[in-house]
Amino acid sequence: MAHVSNLVGEDIEAYLKQHQHKSLLRFITCGSVDDGKSTLIGRLLYDSRMIFEDQLAALEADSKIAGTRGGALDLALLVDGLAAEREQGITIDVAYRFFSTDKRKFIVADTPGHEQYTRNMVTGASTADLAIILIDARKGVLTQTRRHSYLVQLMGIRRAVLAVNKMDLVEWSKDTFDKIVADYTGFADRIGLQNIVAMPLSGLTGDNITSKSPLTPWYEGPALMQHLEEVEIDEQRRINGPFRMPVQWVNRPNADFRGFAGQIVGGAVRPGDTIRIAPSGKLSTIARIVTKDGDLREAVAGQSVTLTLTDEIDCSRGDVIAAATDPPEASDQFETTLVWMSDEPALPGRPYWLKIGARTVSASITEIKHKINVNTLEELAAKVLDLNEIAVANISVDQAIAFDTYDANPDMGGFILIDRTTNATVAAGLIHFALRRAQNVHWQSIDVTRSARAEIKNQKPAVLWFTGLSGAGKSTIANLVDKKLHSLGKHTVLLDGDNVRHGLNRDLGFTDADRVENIRRVAEVAKLMADAGLIVLVSFISPFRAERDLARRLMADGEFFEVFVDTSLADAEKRDVKGLYAKARAGQLKNFTGVNSPYERPENPEIHIDTTKLDAEAAAALIVTRLTG
């Protein structure tokens, strides 16, 4: 079966131009598994009588039938085609369908109902004006119904249709319909989801889809298509806001032209307007608004343009060109809502990439304030987040970024978190506000620099980061290196994992979250000591690459040495002078690296110590030579 009704690229552009005189409604279908989303969308496409000719041709070619719209074209074939897409794995993406009626054009985001694809529902909801929330009349309100409804409200969708589907299977019972509506609206009121229109439907038979059904004389509302054609769209909301344009590309084809390209996500702009670059705060004036069809007198939210300025000021990709009198805020710490989308749990302190608009920065979750039970709306304490969990959390980034709150401007307040190793999107986030301490805490200028502190010690600061399994010999080798460097007159300090846990990190256990925080704290301490001009030896198991990479990024190039003390698990267990492996094997010690918690081997360490070839003394001599040679 061809993937009918999917249009991309030039097809979309041609479609929109053909129907540009009509208003556009973007909506999303969501709900639990088997509530009838494919059938409903198939019915809308079929009954709209406005399926694209190429889609129709694809259907007819696949089915070996001929006919015109509404003639031999079989609705079942269209529905089967949509269902086939799901069976072929297309549920991992959002499928966008395009159709039109005489009154309006539509883009529907068809998202899967399976819980593991919650992330896809978030993607579809991010640009929707309306949500159709389907409920199987036989099953009523389910957990996934509540989850999707919570996300609809969270993503700022202001209008919803409660489509109580498969009413034909409950004999069009008004009592059943009323009970479901009462149950659902009680939950919707608690989450603040308003402007809901409830409808009894059958996607399979078409009742109350394009016209009122005689089977529901007790229902006084509109048919679904009538409502979609007539529902008000707040098309002016973004245009009426303050001017915002994230810079996606700096265009400088020659010395005489320097333009800043991007899509306007808020407000309007005209030549002569005074603008402010965020987050730097520099002021300038709009000289031209350039497009491929010529210069414009005005550009508004939704348009992609190139702006030129009257001044040669610093502005680059990721900056925001904004209204001078109403610029966005800038901060490096925020309270947010996170929707976690990864099988790997969210760990506070672990570094991620945060992408907001065209800017990507390093970020970490500093605190999970609470997660939310979507059934009861109870706020629950949490140290980590698992797949599809929703939480309020504080985020810290490594540099100030320009933002608006998500409620004020979703394009300026929505972001994603990306795994630094796999580049997979692990979370969607919504900014609530900047943390007050971020606005009140500033870097204090210090006159004595780190280079001056190192120069007086006649050495270059460095961090030697020893990593390996428990019992590999890290502490032994690090202690020998410390002694050798001291005998050479070097100024050193040794941070050992066990010793640090007696003081600075005495409050931490050995869960994955605690291990991440353990290494984060030590990495920051190592940086401070290196800033003092010291050679810092850090001996920690540090099992996760992400946290070792975090420590590396804190240091200047050439000042971080990852020392992998490579010992087989069997040899490490033989040494087991502390008896830890034996306890772990007996089930008396949880989260022990190598037994019931993973160790991620370094991929490109600066120094690789193979303990099958080098004893501790030889290993220490090799490390000192590498550092001082």
Image: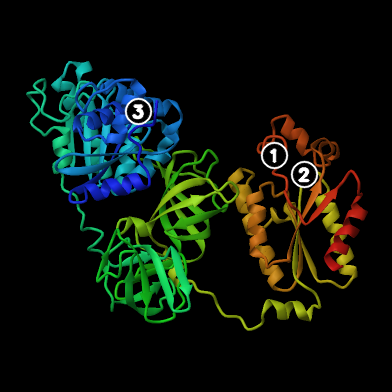
Label placed on residue 82: 3
Q: Nearer the viewer, mark 1 or mark 3?
A: 3
Give the image quarter of residue 231.
Answer: top left
Q: Which label sits on residue 592?
A: 1
Point out residue 112 in the picture as x, y percentages from the top left corner: 38, 33
Q: Nearer the viewer, residue 595 or 611?
A: 611
Q: Position of residue 494 (x, y in %)?
A: 78, 61
Numbered disc in front, either 2 or 3 = 3
- Of callouts 1 and 3, which one flags the residue occurring earlier in the amino acid sequence? 3
> Along the horizontal axis of the image, is 251 left or right of 494?
left
Mark 2: secondary structure? loop
Residues at badges 1 and 3 in contact (C-beta under 8 Å)?
A: no
214 or 85, nearer to the observer = 85
Which residue is located at x 32 percent, y 74 percent?
288
Residue topped by disc 2:
470
Identify the amino acid type marked 1: Phe
Label 2 to label 3, Cα distance in Å? 53 Å
Residue 349 at x, y percent in the picture: 56, 53
Crowd class of label 3 (few under 14; some 14 to 19; many from 20; radius 10 Å):
many
Image disc number at residue 582: none
**Where is residue 557, by image quadrant?**
bottom right
Q: Is residue 33 above or below residue 541?
A: above
Relative to residue 477, is residue 80 drawn left or right?
A: left
In this view, 106 is above or below 69: below
Looking at the rendering, in which quadrant would you find the N terminus?
top left
Cα distance in 3D space between marks 1 and 3: 48 Å
Q: Amino acid at mark 2?
A: Ser
Is mark 2 in CB contact (under 8 Å) with mark 1? yes
Q: Earlier in the sequence, mark 2 or mark 1?
A: 2
The answer to which of marks 2 and 3 sits earlier in the sequence is 3
Where is 3 relative to 253, above or below? above
Tag 2–tag 3 contact (CB < 8 Å):
no
